[in-house]
């Protein structure tokens, strides 16, 4: 069924006149306080929100970095589609130069929320805004989010930021407003090299499954990032970029930013 929760765009429109999520900040609505040394809420508070709807779908992503040439079209389309303010990103493409002069190359790694099966942001959210929706998509309920930012502190992929106007958490939501009408996420539609695939992993005929199966037939390794965090991400990568670029990706307590493109970071790449 279509998700009827308010969108981020709705929240931004309301931010100038109505305080957001007032009920969520009420002390009576909060769960019992977790141990002071833990950012996570009691399991009883997040258990139901960690379970996706029983819709038979399992959404995931496949990023073929062998095809990505760093045009940043996915970034631009995402910012336009979701009203992302200057200096902030829902999706970002990281890069590294590899090899030794004169045999060098630049590899690119498009990144966004990994839509983890065991999502730490859901466990840490003190107001109950983060939840699973269609196909296991990790989304933010903008009628509840209080902008506490604990989700930013625990995300192993730096994929969440706090909107400077609405004062709420923002992240990739698989463009669920497009999915509801049968359209792929904006970044997928825009990618000129067909490096991005999104869809139902349970559907053997879906483009994502066909692309992943084709890579496996070519004996190309499909890898995931930071599996040591045990979040069980729903994004797989092919190609050399993950190993070369992973150290450039933000981690817990960080968010994507324009600093990733600063010329002074060029020295971080081996030559």
Image (tube, grey):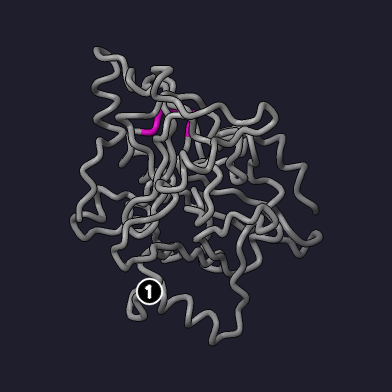
Quadrant of the image for the C terminus? bottom right
Q: Residue furthest bottom?
A: 217
Magenta stretch, main secondary structure, is loop
Residue 191 % position (x, y): 39, 58
Q: Is residue 213 above or below residue 38?
A: below
Report crowding for label 1: few under 14, some 14 to 19, many 20 or more residues within 10 A (C-alpha): some
Q: Is residue 86 magenta?
A: yes
Please, what secondary structure does the residue beneath circle 1 have? Answer: loop
Residue at the spot 44% in from the left edge and 76% down from the top edge = 211
Magenta-drawn segment: 84-88
Instruction: State the image quarter where residue 12 is shown.
Output: top left
Quadrant of the image for the N terminus? bottom left
Residue 232 % position (x, y): 57, 59
Q: Does residue 194 appear to the left or right of 40 in the view shown?
A: left
Residue at the spot 63% in from the left edge and 41% down from the top edge = 250
Total numbered labels: 1
Instruction: State the image quarter where residue 25 is shown.
Output: top left
Residue at the spot 41% in from the left edge and 54% down from the top edge = 51
Q: Does residue 214 appear to the left or right of 52 in the view shown?
A: right
Q: Is residue 21 visible?
A: yes
Residue 255 % position (x, y): 57, 35
Please name whichever residue, 68 or 120, is drawn nearer the observer in this view of the structure: 120
Mark 1 lies on residue? 202
Residue 151 % position (x, y): 53, 35
Q: Is residue 106 visible?
A: no
Please name whichever residue, 94 or 184, is drawn nearer the observer in this view of the structure: 184
Q: Is residue 43 magenta?
A: no
């Amino acid at each position: 069924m279509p998700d009827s929760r308010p969108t981020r765009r709705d929240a931004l429109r309301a931010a100038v006149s109505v305080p957001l999520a007032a009920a969520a900040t009420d002390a009576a609505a909060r769960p019992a306080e977790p141990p002071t040394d833990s950012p996570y809420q009691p399991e009883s508070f997040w258990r139901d929100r960690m379970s996706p709807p029983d819709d038979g779908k399992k959404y995931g992503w496949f990023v073929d970095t062998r095809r990505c040439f760093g045009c940043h079209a996915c970034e631009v389309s995402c910012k336009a589609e979701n009203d992302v303010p200057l200096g902030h990103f829902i999706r970002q493409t990281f890069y590294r130069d590899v090899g030794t002069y004169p045999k060098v190359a630049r590899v690119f790694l498009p990144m966004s929320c990994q839509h983890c099966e065991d999502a730490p942001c859901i466990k840490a959210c003190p107001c109950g805004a983060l939840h699973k929706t269609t196909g296991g998509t990790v989304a933010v309920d903008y009628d509840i989010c209080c902008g506490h930012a604990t989700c930013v502190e625990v995300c192993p992929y730096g994929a969440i930021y706090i909107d400077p106007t609405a004062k709420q958490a923002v992240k990739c939501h698989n463009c669920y407003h497009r999915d509801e009408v049968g359209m792929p996420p904006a970044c997928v539609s825009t990618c000129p090299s067909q490096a991005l695939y999104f869809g139902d992993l349970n559907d053997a005929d879906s483009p994502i499954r066909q692309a992943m199966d084709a890579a496996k037939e070519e004996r190309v390794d499909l890898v995931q990032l930071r599996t040591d965090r045990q979040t069980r991400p729903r994004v797989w990568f092919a190609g050399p970029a993950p190993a070369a670029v992973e150290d450039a990706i933000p981690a817990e307590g960080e968010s994507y930013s324009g600093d990733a493109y600063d010329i002074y970071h060029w020295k971080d790449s081996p030559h």
